[in-house]
Structure formats: C-alpha cells, structure tokens
Image (cartoon, grey):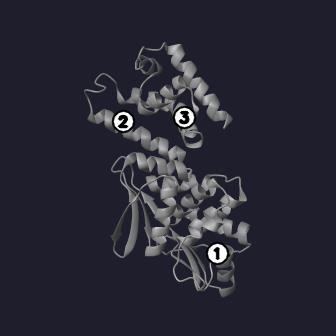
Amino acid sequence: MSFSSDVKNELVKNELQKNCCKKSMLYGMALFSKSFSFNGVVFQSENENAAFIFRQMLVEQLALNCRIKVSPSGRNYSIEIKSPEKCNKIMTYFGHSKGDANLKINFSNFDCAECYNSFLAGVFLACGTVSSPEKDYHLEFSVSYLNLSKSLVTLINELELEPKQTNRKGYNIIYFKDSEAIEDCLYIMGASSSMFEMMNIKIVKDIRNSANRRANCETANIEKTVKAAMPQIEAIIKIKKEKGFDSLSEPLREMAEMRLENPELSLSELAEMFNPPLSRSGANHRLGRLMKIAKEL
C-alpha cells in the first residue's frame, strides 16, 4: 500500500465532532471530484475507503443513497449521480446555482475554523496525492478548472501555507515540495500519524546521509528515540497551532523550540543543548508542563 493511500485511510477514519465540519469535508470531496454540476456529480478514487465515506456522508447529510461502482480492473471506485433531482439537491445544499459563471469554492459553507481543515481533507481525498517520503517530498492537488484551482490556493493561503502552481496535461497542479510544508499540510488535514511517520523517515534519512552528525548512533536507536519524543512533539505542535509560542513562558518556549528542532535527541542530550545546561529532570519537567498545557487545550 502506498503512503498516499495510508494518508487517505487515516483521513477517512477521523471522527469529526461537528456537523459543520462533516458538511465541509463532504463539500471538498464533491466540489473537487471528477464532476460537480447540475448535470452530474461523479466521485472517483482508487481508494475504496474514500468512496465508501463519500457514499456514507451523502446518506447522512443529504439522505441520498448511491451505489459504488467498481471498475473491471478492480482498481477504481466511483459514485455517479445523474438524476437531475439529486444533482440539484447537492448543488443547492452547498450554495451553488445554475447561474454561476465559474466553479469556485463557496466559503459561506464554513462555520468554524476547523471547517477549513476538514474541507482540505475532503479535497485531498478527491484529487490529492503524496509521494512516499522514502523517495521524494511531493504533495499535490490536481484540479480540472483554473478558477477552482485559484480558489483552492486562496483557501490554502488562509491556512498559512504557500503552495506552488503549475499545469500538467491540462490539469492545474497545486503542490508542495518542501518537507516541512507537507508535514504542516498533513497535520492541518488531520493526518497526524502520517505526518509523524514522514518526520521519522526524514530524520532517519538525514542521519544516514550525515555520518559525521551521528557517527556512533545506530538507526534503530534513533528511531526508538524519535518514537519516544513523538508525544512531546505532538503536544508542542498543538500548542503552536492553537495558542502560539508567545503564550508560553520563556523557559517553556525555549524548550518547545529546542524539542521541535531536535526530535532525534535523547532527554539528556536535549538538556545539554541549553546554555547553561539543564539537568535531565529539569528538561523532563518542562516537557511535562508542555504536554499538560496541550492536554488542557
């Protein structure tokens, strides 16, 4: 199974708590599907779980029962809605009218900040792919319509990400090549486990390519250390996203930044990075406070 499939499987398993966020995710999947118009809504994917969640959300949000079609090769799953009545119900539900000159995102569908994240997750399920970090750093959205792609760039910019754009075989490609930007995008969409897997792979790659940096450390020990640090990093990222580091005291802010920059270091090594150096228990105490703050958010 590919890394891209793993990401999509993680996204469909997320349990969204708010109805507005569920609507936003369905909107992202529908709007960026193969076809989204009053003449037909067609969702197509190589991921069976993505097709299943699309059908399930249509039932929950719009009371529309649809059948999943499987291609002869068994590699593609599609849901085709051709009924004018059903198409009209979907289009009007998301605030689109027959008089719209160009297809673009209707931002009035988003009721809270998390709706943007859920919507982007839906877009990725419909038209997104990401390369295995073992081979390359590349995440992209492939969009058929120019104005719709511009609208997506606007939304992504509002999430404080800056994608690049190109055109490939008539499709408008919105993409990231920077590993940190891809990690941020995965986190925003709700694929935190995939983000940590990517971070872990990247760290191991860096270590393998920088023998002088960690000459005496075996890869297995590094992976073990990184795995142990992941709950701390997840807590720090949550604080950064929801409150910002300016909300922290100077000692905690310094610890948060130091841990993010050095996820491969053990607790003792991390403590020695400070000036003056901290004790191991002192470093552990600060990290514990950060995790407590994140838990209370």
From the top left corner, tell me how far across and down residue 295 is, in percent: 65, 34
Q: Residue furthest left?
A: 212
- For badge 1, the amino acid type reads Arg
From the top left corner, tell me how far across and down residue 72 is, in percent: 49, 75
From the top left corner, tell me how far across and down residue 252 is, in percent: 54, 26
Along the line of sight, the residue nearer the viewer: 89 or 220: 89
Q: Earlier in the sequence, mark 3 or mark 2?
A: 2
In this rendering, does residue 1 appear at all?
A: no
Quadrant location of the C terminus in the rendered image:
top right
Question: Can you tell which mark lies on residue 204?
Answer: 2
For mark 3, does the 10 Å Cα neighbourhood hold few (<14), some (14 to 19), or many (20 or more) residues? few
For mark 2, does the 10 Å Cα neighbourhood hold few (<14), some (14 to 19), or many (20 or more) residues? many
129 horizontally vs 64: left or right: left
Query: For the residues marked 3 and 1, what is the alpha-carbon distance in whole angstroms?
Result: 50 Å
275 is higher (above) or lower (below) than 154: above
Question: Can you tell which mark lies on residue 67?
Answer: 1
